[in-house]
């Protein structure tokens, strides 16, 4: 799966959790754009894990601030 | 015969709309089965039955809105011969010995009026006693009152009402339900408020190590650990776990923690997780995730709605330092958690920064005093210093 496909999956899962979300600015911190509590965040990561089969350790959460960062992180792990 | 009545699914509910039956006449049901789906202002709720029996007659029709307490169906109790038809022959009035004493409480002679309808009628100047009711047994509903008010000729030219743009019916109903419960709380409950800053280094370290070994699906949030600490501490504080009813405190038999869950479309719901103190942490986390998911999907069970014995509200993710929580009547206490963040902390004459959280308690002063509340918060704080005991 390439970065573009991963981006689509990430956006789809994000919108499933926050249906009110419209445009995501890829370089802006997600939590400034979407109301995500820790349960939403965990559900989001679980969904990504299920679809992409990529394990995301808790220690890596801090690397996942923006959409771009999430896509980069997952692409590196998928590749 | 067992009468299956519409239960109250929270202090803010006085009527509900039957959406669907999940059983039909002749079906055998057992305690805990889901028998009906009822819409309340807050959610569609799967209503459970608490007795075994065979469905004899479904009285309420889907689509009807009925007051709490209305008999929706009749069932033959286990051991009771299912009655083919109510046939009052000249047989001696002897109930079968096996039947539990579930004698009908007597059909209402005058048609019932829901409290909401009565209140609404007063506001609109409608005489409820003279209204024909459209509910079962001629029950008068809010809709009947509104129809009557509209039908009545206007007394004077009413000034045009200025109204905010109409929100959706659901949002409106949700706001009304919250307004009713919170107004009652602030009107009736003499709250006292306490808070304590709890150092969380041990809990954070322990939970980090706990989660490190687990796949994403098995990870536990700090919120679950806090819930467990509250429930565990409550074992020694029965005076904070229960209900204020009829001018007296009724302790609850179990510790069923209501979890305040915000809904994306706006509004709030606080269904219960049952017997939290007895649940292993990973199961509690699963129950919490499941509850949040179902609350947001609008699919809750009646027992979850009707029996929380205390509520926990966690606004830490939103960044607040401290919550000043308002009790959900008829409960007598509510616990709030703020943000988990580094706090300056003095220990052994040294100052450092440690992760900490402010826990707060809103207590009903009729049921308990600040002294007890303070000891309770201290117990929660102590438990969070030994997180392994909460696993």
Image (cartoon, rainbow, N blue to C red):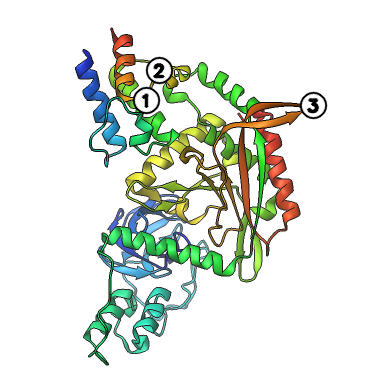
> Which of marks 2 and 1 precedes in the sequence?
1
- Per the model, the C-alpha gap separating discs 3 and 2 is 38 Å
Q: Is residue B22 left or right of residue B122?
A: left
Give residue A33's position: percent from left, percent from top: 33, 36
Q: CA distance from mark 3 to mark 1?
A: 41 Å
In the image shown, does B327 or B167 lie closer to the viewer?
B167
Look at 38% across and 61% down and name the residue there: B175
Alpha-carbon distance for marks 1 and 2? 8 Å
| Percent coordinates x, y for residue B191 in the rendering | 63, 61
The residue under the point 33% across, 89% down is: B130
The residue that label 2 is drawn on is A56
Specify the label residue B348 is tagged with: 3
Q: Secondary structure at mark 3?
A: loop
Task: Describe residue B279's horizontal placement relative to residue B382 as left or right.
Answer: left
- Kind of element beneath mark 2: loop
Have a look at marks 1 and 2 and say if they share a chain.
yes
Tell me what residue is drawn at x 34 percent, y 20 percent: A49
- Find disc 1 in the rendering and name its residue: A45
Q: Return the mark for residue B267.
A: none
Q: Is residue B307 left or right of residue B120?
A: right
Identify which residue, B196 or B248, lies in the foreground: B196
Q: Which part of the image, by quadrant, shows the N terminus of chain A? A: top left
Q: Residues within 10 Å of mark 3 (few under 14, many from 20)?
A: few
Q: Residue A31, position in %: x, y?
A: 38, 33
Is there a contact, CB below 8 Å, between mark 1 and mark 2? yes
Q: Is residue B31 above or below residue B64?
A: above
In the rendered image, residues at marks 3 and 2 fall on the same chain: no
- Position of the C terminus of chain A by quadrant: top left
Task: Please say if B182 is above or below A25.
Answer: below
Residue in the image at 42% along x and 57% along y? B53
Q: Secondary structure at mark 1?
A: helix
Q: Is residue B25 visible?
A: no
């Amino acid at each position: 799966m390439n970065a573009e496909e991963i981006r689509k999956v990430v956006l789809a899962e994000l919108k499933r959790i926050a249906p009110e979300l419209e445009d995501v600015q890829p370089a802006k911190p997600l939590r400034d754009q979407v109301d995500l509590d820790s349960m939403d965040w965990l559900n989001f990561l679980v969904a990504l894990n299920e679809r992409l089969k990529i394990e995301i350790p808790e220690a890596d959460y801090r690397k996942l601030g923006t959409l771009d960062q999430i896509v980069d992180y997952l692409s590196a792990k998928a590749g | 015969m067992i009468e299956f009545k519409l239960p109250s699914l929270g202090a803010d509910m006085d009527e509900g709309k039957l959406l669907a039956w999940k059983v039909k006449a002749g079906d055998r049901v057992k305690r805990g089965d889901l028998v009906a789906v009822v819409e309340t202002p807050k959610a569609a709720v799967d209503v459970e039955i608490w007795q075994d029996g065979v469905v004899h007659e479904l009285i309420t029709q889907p689509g009807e809105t009925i007051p709490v307490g209305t008999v929706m169906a009749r069932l033959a109790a286990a051991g009771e011969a299912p009655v083919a038809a109510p046939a009052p022959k000249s047989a001696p009035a002897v109930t079968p010995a096996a039947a539990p004493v579930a004698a009908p409480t007597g059909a209402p002679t005058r048609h019932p009026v829901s409290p909401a309808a009565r209140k609404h009628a007063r506001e609109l100047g409608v005489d409820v006693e003279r209204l024909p009711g459209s509910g079962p047994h001629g029950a008068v509903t809010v809709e009947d009152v509104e129809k009557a008010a509209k039908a009545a000729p206007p007394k004077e030219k009413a000034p045009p009402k200025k109204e905010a743009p109409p929100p959706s019916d659901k949002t409106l109903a949700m706001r009304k339900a919250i307004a009713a419960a919170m107004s009652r709380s602030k009107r009736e409950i003499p709250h006292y408020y306490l808070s304590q800053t709890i150092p969380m280094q041990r809990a954070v370290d322990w939970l980090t190590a706990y989660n490190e070994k687990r796949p994403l699906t098995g990870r536990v949030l700090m919120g679950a650990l806090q819930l467990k600490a509250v429930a565990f501490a409550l074992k020694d504080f029965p005076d904070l776990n229960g209900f204020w009813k009829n001018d007296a405190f009724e302790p609850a038999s179990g510790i069923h923690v209501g979890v305040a869950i915000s809904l994306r479309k706006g509004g709030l719901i606080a269904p219960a997780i049952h017997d939290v103190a007895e649940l292993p942490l990973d199961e509690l986390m699963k129950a919490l995730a499941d509850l949040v998911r179902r609350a947001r999907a609008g699919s809750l069970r009646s027992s979850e709605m009707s029996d929380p014995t205390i509520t926990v509200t966690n606004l830490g993710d939103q960044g607040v330092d401290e919550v000043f929580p308002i009790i959900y009547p008829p409960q007598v206490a509510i616990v709030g958690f703020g943000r988990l963040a580094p706090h300056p902390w003095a220990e052994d004459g040294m100052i450092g920064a440690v992760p900490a959280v402010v826990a707060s308690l809103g207590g009903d002063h009729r049921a308990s005093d600040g002294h007890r509340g303070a000891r309770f918060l201290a117990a929660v704080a102590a438990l969070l210093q030994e997180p392994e005991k909460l696993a």
